[in-house]
Image (cartoon, helix red, strand yellow):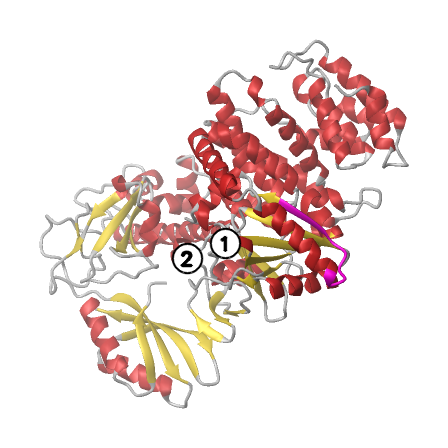
Amino acid sequence: MIRQYELVERVRSYDRELDENLLNRAYVFSMKAHGKQMRASGDPYFSHPLEVAGILTGMQLDCDTIVTALLHDTIEDTLATYEQIEELFGEEVARMVDGVTKLSKLEYMSESSKQAENFRKFLLAMSNDIRVLLVKLADRLHNMRTLHFITKPEKRARISRETLDIYAPLAERIGMQEIKEELEALAFPNVYPEAHESIIRRLDFLHANTADIRDQVVTELEWLLTEAGIEAEVKGREKKPFSIWRKMTYRNVSLEDQADILAFRIIVDDTETCYRALGVVHRQWQAVPGLIKDYISMPKPNGYQSIHTAVIGPQKKKIEIQIRSSEMDAVAEKGVAAHWSYKQHASEKEGAQYRWLQDLLEILEHSTDPEEFLEHTKLAMYQNQVFCFTPKGELISLPMGATVIDFAYAVHTRIGDNCVGAKINGKPVQLRTRLSNGDQVQILRSNAQQPSPNWLSFVITGKAKSAIRRFIRHQKRDEYIKLGKSILERAFQHENRDFNKKSMELAARNLNISDPDELFEQVGKGELLDRKVLETVFPGIKLNGWESATAFVRSDTADTPRKGDGSIPIRGLTPGLAVHLSECCHPLPGDRIVGISTTGKGILVHTIDCDALDVYSETPEVWLDLSWFKPGEEANFFVGRIEVLLDHEPGSLANVLNVVALERGNLSNIKFAERSPDMFRIELDIEVRDVKHLTSIITALRANERVNSVERSFS
């Protein structure tokens, strides 16, 4: 265990402005507060905060951070209070101690919810001061180093899983590679013991066959660089077992095919020499196409800079070589701790490498489900990155597999909401197009555009999903309010009663509902019948023989539908339900359809191949088998949406509208999705009888010489 004077000397060695009195007081306070508490190892509990402080002195962190490390468990595990810490050690230390505290007294329905909510709280504290995260990582690292003292394997596995899911990725995102790799190495055998043993056995086999190659490559690189007049330090290292396993699992790359199992690092004085060294390496050994990555000109989000190249080296072995300056190497290993300046209160978190943190905070602000937030958080931290540019040259980093919509939301939420199209490297693309490294992306916007529920089937970033879901929640409520109000107006009109604000306020008050809008919403959802509202406003009213205005849907046992009565001609539903035709796929008579039932929210009808159905794949109990009534049983019209690409010439639009009219379609809406000097793309909403009617219109349009393409739209 570190002695008090040893801790003081460690901090004094790099911090000339050390407040020795403050550090000594924190040491004594923590030791007395923890008293006779013991750890699972049998050591005094005070040894833990002391070791955490020792880890942080290795990062050369300031006095306040070391004091926070000594005190970080006092509020949670002792009788010490926040007010006491603030009085004795100052507001800044108290705030950081509170941010690190685990909040274990909170109770939630499930362990995963508790974990997610704790992480939300921690993230808020971390956003104000990144040192909170550094203390937390050091705390977790020491706990993992002593994890073997815990006797229950289930508990070791749970703590290790949390480490792999949250703390190792967090360390990676702030560039602390050494801590990240040690956390993974300590957690891996507890979570995946069989995989760990298998990787170790296979690495031992590889060692037997490549025992001499490391020394050979190091020696040859040192000679080549010296001959070229380049002063450099050359190191060889082996990839860690967990990194190998993760690449095998998530990228489906076999161990033998991983070029970076054995990697070499060339460390030089400056950036210019990095590129000279790259030339020396490539003159000696053949480069592997597609495996050269320049993270110097395009750094990773965590600030990491280096040149990576893979070559066919001695013995025809594929090896990876990393080339970086000594300053880049310090940042690569120590991350934020290598360049964080507390004395000047530098606000590094406002830089590009902390943009991911701001995105997580935006999701946190609007998230209603802790587990959903945790899902987005893990995704944002884990995914490999793809780097794209705005038309003005701003660099946007996104997870691999991100789409145009993800890019739009990464730039700004409003741009995502209004996105109608995009150009990648000057060429028009679909919204679901996945981005590649180096793409220049131009987002096309329209104030008339709104997020589509269909977007959820292909976006992958938490920020995009959160914004779309937030809009859908608000839109659904507005739709239910509008539908409920329409139902009640019809019901009141049927009974020759006056429908007004005063009567709705009376009904809401008598039914213990907060306001008329909530009343309309409940009626629109089918949770409250219009009959009940009438009886509440007009006690004793006679409604014998009267059919509820909510009975918009006929069952398959009903008589032949009445033409033009405004109902939806679907078989398989019972009367009295609120039913909506989905706006993501615009189902038409003739399409194969299914219904999705949500308790209290009615039925949403989709085409059988609608992408939005993917989110219900694991809940088959909400699916309803539906079909349309036979043709001729009704005379209603339904909206079908098509997308048309036209020549940008006078009269083109008139040609399209004339074709629609000749085919007896009625245009209900038109939206210009994209314009260019040569052509423009429009979306048309057309009232048709059924899918056959819409197909005939599409066929006629394709025959028009001004039309380049026509497709049915499901967005």
- Residue 246 falls left or right of residue 272: left
Spot occupied by residue 304 in the image (x, y as percentages of width and height): 66, 52
Q: Which residues make up the magenta segment? A: 227-236
Of residues 122 and 22, the one drawn nearer to the viewer in this rendering: 22
Residue 373 visible to the viewer: no
Outermost bottom residue: 650
Of residues 640 and 620, the one drawn nearer to the viewer in this rendering: 620
**396 drawn magenta:** no
Instruction: Residue at 52%, 42% (x, y): give it.
Output: 243
Residue 21 visible to the viewer: yes
- Residue 408 falls left or right of residue 138: left
Amino acid type indicated by mark 1? Ala
For the residue carrying disc 1, how many other residues have a C-alpha within 10 Å: few (<14), some (14-19), or many (20+)? many
Of residues 407 and 292, the one drawn nearer to the viewer in this rendering: 292
For the residue carrying disc 2, how many other residues have a C-alpha within 10 Å: few (<14), some (14-19), or many (20+)? many
Please identify the quarter of the rendering in which residue 146 is found. top right
Spot occupied by residue 160 in the image (x, y as percentages of width and height): 52, 29
Spot occupied by residue 406 in the image (x, y as percentages of width and height): 50, 58
- Residue 619 falls left or right of residue 384: left
Kindly indicate whether the residue at mark 1 contacts the one at mark 2 (C-beta within 8 angstroms).
yes
The residue where tag 2 is placed is 455
Amino acid type indicated by mark 2? Trp
Give the vertical position of 310 relative to 60 (above or below). below
Outermost top residue: 36
Instruction: Residue at 18%, 42% (x, y): give it.
Output: 544
Q: Using the numbered discs, state the Cα–Cα distance from disc 2 to disc 1 in whole angstroms.
A: 9 Å
Q: Quadrant of the N terminus?
A: top right
Q: Secondary structure at mark 2?
A: helix
Of residues 109 and 627, the one drawn nearer to the viewer in this rendering: 109
Q: Earlier in the sequence, mark 2 or mark 1?
A: 2
The residue where tag 1 is placed is 464
Q: Secondary structure at mark 1?
A: helix
